[in-house]
Image (cartoon, rainbow, N blue to C red):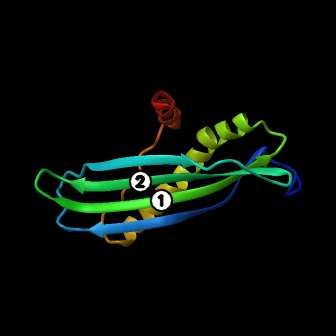
Amino acid sequence: MENNSVKSEFEIGKSCVKEFNIDIINRNFPNEKKYDFELKVGISDIQVKEEYQYANIFLACNIMLKNEEREFLKIYIKYMGEFRASVKLEKNKFLDYCKYNGAPIISQNLRAYLKAVTALSEIEPIDFPTINFNNVFKEENKEK
């Protein structure tokens, strides 16, 4: 099998952390840690260049560890992935690919980054929860 014999209709280009901030307010974390996760998802307008159409997907997440009396930890992370498909692919289908394939792909990259950076910060590694993007986009459609 040749290296380039499999071509996907939908491809990821670059992906990266666009913004990141960690604020360890108090290292005396409670024994039982319950993190609050707030996620925002964004998809750029589709751009067409030559034979491809492109869109960027952003996941922005606020993570907090607090109890009734005090805050212990705040993390903000914004992760971006660039996706492309042939201009022959219908724009609505490309947008669906971005929502239901692209967002889960970059959420896994965000998960790995978050776990690594928290471990390197000498705190217990944080597991980013699994997200059901069907529900995320279903809720988004209800708000419109």
Q: Compare marks 2 and 1 and give the one earlier in the sequence.
A: 2
Res 62 quadrant in image: bottom left
Q: Secondary structure at mark 1?
A: strand
Identified at 86% across, 56% down, the residue is: 4
Could you tell me which residue is drawn at 49 percent across and 34 percent down? 140
Q: CA distance from mark 2 to mark 1?
A: 6 Å
Toward the viewer: 18 or 133?
18
Circle 2 — which element?
A: strand
Residue 61: numbered disc: 2
Amino acid, disc 1: Lys
Q: Is residue 142 left or right of residue 44?
A: left
Q: Position of residue 36 (x, y in %)?
A: 30, 48
- View extreme (left): residue: 69
Which residue lies at the image location 52% right of the left edge and 37% below the top edge? 133
Q: Is residue 39 left or right of residue 124?
A: right
The answer to whether marks 2 and 1 mark residues whose Cβ atoms lie closer than 8 Å is yes
Q: At which x and y percent is residue 100? A: 60, 38
Label 2 neighbourhood size at 10 Å, few (<14), some (14-19), many (20+)?
many
Residue 78, numbered circle:
1
- How far across and how far down the image is residue 45, in percent? 65, 48
Q: At x 65% / y 36%, what residue is drawn? A: 96
